[in-house]
Amino acid sequence: MVNLKGIWTKHTLINLLLGQFLSLLITATGFLSSELARKGINAPTSQSFLNYVLLALFYGVFMVCRQEPIKAKWYYYILLGIVDVEANFLVVKSYQYTSLTSVMLLDCWAIPCVLLFTWFFLKTKYRPRKLVGVAICIVGLVLVIFSDVHAADRSSGSNPLKGDIIVIAGATLYAVSNVSEEFFVKSADMVELMAFLGLFGAIASACQISILERNELKSIHWSAGAALPFVGFALAMFLFYSFVPILLKRSGATMLNLALLTSDMWAVLIRIFVYHQKVDWIYFVAFAAVAVGLLVYSGRDKVDQNLADVANEGIVRSKRIDEESGLDNPARKDATESSKTEDK
């Protein structure tokens, strides 16, 4: 049973707010990508390239200033950079072949992948309460899917099967990237992770741009209207990548992917208040369902609190024993050893 008092803790609220901040950043990147597509610019790898460059420059300076040894094998970061670049590329590419509804639905494939990968590789244990929270979040998203189906969105797409396969592949790579980042954040260092991810991500993007998007970039008529969405996208992605490790360290990759489910709901609110469009009431029910699911997943239940209390009590007891034995007082320890020496 969920402990409602345990849910409303400072730790939980910070995680929820941070997750929604990241969700808003993803929403911003989606709208900027749509703006570029509306202008006829189709260069998904080029959009991400500037973000990787910013990460490499910003966090690389910190690494050089710290002059600390690398805590993880550098070639692991090469693989992570390639996986991250291809995940971004595949999901954006899928919009050319399948509908928005299909992308939204199949992109959720990342959640069970993250659960499986964290359980198998990181040995993360999931209590039934957390699985219930995941299920509630997915139900909320399914409500959005039904609303879009009602709007006849699924009929769009030039090659739905090809697009669906691309989305599934991209979602799987997203899961691999998120779980790998969680591992590096907890075992290595956030600055090191971001610096190398930016460096190798920029190199992989540059190679891919030279092969796939060179002609597309040449055909673009650069102006303020075309450059600003590019720069805005890069800045939003830079902030997103910078804050993701914080949430990964606090709550893990599963919480990150669940929080990002609300990006579609934020997009709906922007459609209402910015573009003055009408949307189905189901969206609001879906948003509430995802919010409840996040609360259930991120809240601490009674068992978790008891374990934390036991751990804290053990620390206090150990400290008290050390104080009584004089182990935590160097002067007293030296005096005791001196007394033993004199007796001899």
Image (cartoon, grey):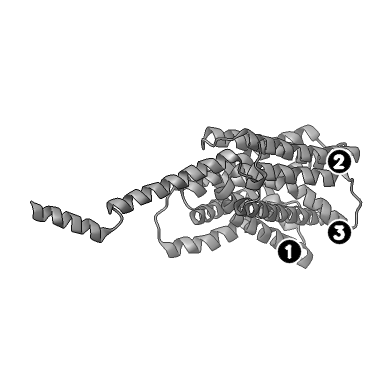
Q: Amino acid at mark 3?
A: Phe
Q: CA distance from mark 3 to mark 1?
A: 26 Å
Q: Is residue 326 above or below residue 93?
A: below
**Where's residue 98, x and y in %?**
80, 38
Residue 141 figure quarter: top right
Q: Which residue is located at x 31 percent, y 52 percent?
A: 324
Q: Give the percent coordinates (x, y) of residue 190.
A: 51, 54
Nearer the camera: disc 1 or disc 2? 2
- Is residue 87 visible from the viewing direction of this image? no
Mark carried by residue 227: 1
Q: Which residue is mark 3?
A: 273
> Marks 2/3: CA distance?
19 Å
Residue type at mark 2: give it: Asp
Residue mark closest to the camera, 3 vs 1: 3
Pick out the residue farthest to the left. Answer: 344
Question: What secondary structure is found at the residue carrying circle 2?
Answer: helix
- Which of the marked residues, 3 or 1, is nearer the chain's N terminus? 1
Q: Secondary structure at mark 3?
A: helix
Q: Are marks 2 and 3 in contact (CB under 8 Å)?
A: no
* Marking on residue 323: none
Give SS at disc 1.
helix
User: Which residue is disc 2 drawn over?
Assistant: 148
Q: Residues within 10 Å of mark 3 (few under 14, many from 20)?
A: few
- Foreground pick, 312 / 56: 312
* Observer-nearest of 134 and 241: 134
Residue at image x 19%, y 55%? 336
Front: mark 2 or 3? 3
